[in-house]
Amino acid sequence: MNKNIEIEFHPDGRPLGMSIGTWKKMHRILAAIHLNHLDEVMEMQKRRGNDNG
């Protein structure tokens, strides 16, 4: 098995062979995960601030 798999990308960043629909869906999911993570971080910082105050 070849471990050096090279993935070629379209100019818009999606891997060759992946449909635009799939790519956009993936981006929405990743964006949602990222936003949820940011919300959690903000909550943690708020709590930390309350503990100190």
Image (spheres, rainbow, N blue to C red):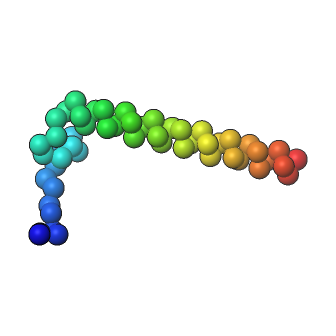
23 displayed left or right of 6? right
* Residue 49 locus on image (x, y percent): 79, 47
User: In the image as oriented, which residue stretches furthest toward the top?
Assistant: 21
Q: Which quadrant, please, contains the N terminus?
A: bottom left
34 displayed left or right of 23? right
Can residue 45 be seen here?
A: yes
Count of numbered circles on the image: 0
Q: Residue at x 85, y 51 (%)?
A: 52
- Residue 18, compared with residue 52, is above or below; it is above
Can residue 11 be seen here?
A: no
* Residue 21 locus on image (x, y percent): 22, 30
User: In the image as oriented, which residue stretches furthest toward the front?
Assistant: 1
- Name which quarter of the figure residue 5 lies in: bottom left
13 displayed left or right of 52? left
- Residue 1, compared with residue 48, is above or below; it is below
In the image, 12 versus 15, the foreground residue is 15
Q: Residue at x 54, y 43 (%)?
A: 37
* Residue 6 locus on image (x, y percent): 14, 61
Q: Residue at x 60, y 39 (%)?
A: 39
* Residue 42 locus on image (x, y percent): 65, 42
